[in-house]
Image (cartoon, rainbow, N blue to C red):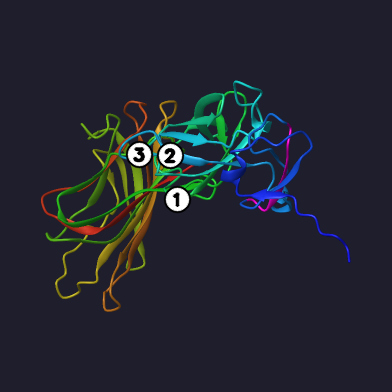
């Protein structure tokens, strides 16, 4: 009968309490993988298991927020120092890859600190937007998400998909439900996107004959631009097209006013507005489609499209407000999405 010989074996935590001699083999029962001693490294040098190999050379660590309450803007990632391939001693090497579970959603630009026995290194996490590196926008990663980053020698480039956004293409910024309000504002998290998309559904009014409008701000919503919108709108009603063109004091989303029809309460308004060229280097442009969700008994359909250019200053847009063209309240569901190319 063949003789069975068992190597030294224990958990990762217990192995870390000893320093195996050179050439001594052991088994890490936590990782289910071997280690080898070098007479210098506590716990021995890990030998990758098959699972670790097929997962690539990503190094996984425990991430914690440096702020209270937790956020994802300043994160420290503590690494098992035996995985020494990521460092050249005092700093992280270019090409090193890290995975961590985000402790909370980021609210904007995020800094990642790598901490290991004998060293620490920190750099900003960046994404690519519009063909260039950019800071993260709010909720580019969210609590509990596995985030992958690669150090390029200067910054950590985010490699995995961003929070709910399939690699940063779409990110939900905010959704609001309006119930009898005079206006609705979006003032947080609009920066850092190539486009913004505002979607409104099931919008109704409490005063008859009203237009729904959008105005923009470049100072976080302290003031809103009420002039210099120039565009056109086309609406199909009863099989005929009607048009509205020229300069206005707001982006008007419908030509035939929203009607209050108590006998036909399902006559609600819906729209999708896309804001293009959000930076300070271009004119701000807007395109939209809209439709009245009229009941089957309604005499005509109401749907259309339009586009506007804001011809005032070229400052970057950072806030939006939805309002009626005159007195009255409106209700409905609104969602703002950020898009990057």
Sequence-earlier tag: 2 or 3: 2
Q: Quadrant of the N terminus?
A: bottom right
Question: Do tag 1 and tag 2 residues touch (Cβ < 8 Å)?
Answer: no
Q: Which element is circle 1 on?
A: loop
Q: Position of residue 200 (x, y in %)?
A: 31, 56
**Residue under the image location 88 percent in, 63 percent down:** 2
Front: mark 1 or 2: 2
Q: Is residue 293 above or below residue 64?
A: below
**Which residues are drawn in magenta?**
31-38
Q: Is residue 303 above or below residue 148?
A: below
Horizontal side of residue 278 vs 296, given as left or right = right
Question: Do tag 1 and tag 3 residues touch (Cβ < 8 Å)?
Answer: no
Front: mark 1 or 3: 1
**Which residue, given by chain and number where applicable, does mark 1 sit on?**
144
Relative depth, front residue between 269 and 63: 63
**Which residue, given by chain and number where applicable, does mark 2 sit on?**
64
Sequence-earlier tag: 1 or 2: 2
Q: Position of residue 305 (x, y in %)?
A: 38, 53
Front: mark 2 or 3: 2
Could you tell me how far apart the alpha carbons at marks 2 and 3 are, in whole angstroms?
23 Å
Which mark, by number, is residue 179? none
**Which residue, given by chain and number where applicable, does mark 3 sit on?**
189
């Amino acid at each position: 009968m063949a003789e069975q010989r068992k190597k030294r074996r224990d958990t990762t935590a217990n192995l870390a309490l000893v320093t195996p001699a050179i050439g001594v083999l052991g088994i890490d029962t936590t990782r289910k993988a071997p280690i080898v001693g070098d007479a210098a490294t506590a716990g021995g040098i890990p030998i990758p298991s098959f699972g670790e190999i097929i997962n690539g050379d990503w190094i996984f660590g425990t991430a914690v927020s440096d702020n209270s309450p937790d956020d994802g803007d300043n994160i420290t990632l503590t690494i098992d120092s035996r995985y020494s391939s990521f460092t050249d001693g005092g700093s992280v090497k270019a090409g090193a890859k890290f995975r961590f579970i985000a402790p909370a959603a980021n609210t904007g630009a995020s800094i990642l600190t790598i901490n290991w026995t004998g060293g620490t290194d920190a750099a900003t996490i960046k994404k690519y937007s519009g063909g260039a590196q950019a800071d993260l926008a709010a909720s580019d990663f969210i609590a509990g998400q596995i985030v992958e980053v690669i150090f390029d020698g200067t910054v950590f480039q985010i490699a995995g998909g961003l929070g709910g956004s399939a690699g940063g293409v779409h990110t939900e910024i905010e959704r609001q439900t309006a119930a009898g309000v005079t206006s609705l504002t979006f003032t947080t998290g609009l920066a850092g996107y190539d486009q913004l998309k505002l979607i409104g559904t099931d919008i109704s009014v409490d005063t008859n004959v009203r237009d729904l409008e959008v105005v923009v701000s470049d100072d976080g919503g302290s003031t809103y631009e009420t002039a210099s919108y120039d565009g056109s709108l086309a609406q199909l009603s009863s099989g005929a097209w009607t048009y509205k063109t020229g300069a206005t004091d707001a982006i008007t989303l419908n030509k035939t006013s929203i009607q209050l029809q108590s006998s036909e309460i399902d006559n609600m308004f819906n729209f999708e507005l896309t804001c293009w060229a959000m930076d300070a280097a271009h004119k701000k442009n807007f395109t939209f489609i809209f439709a009245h969700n009229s009941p089957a008994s309604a005499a005509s359909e109401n749907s259309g499209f339009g586009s506007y250019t804001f011809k005032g200053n070229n400052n970057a847009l950072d806030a939006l407000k939805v309002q009626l063209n005159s007195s009255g309240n409106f209700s409905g569901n609104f969602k703002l999405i950020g898009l990057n190319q």
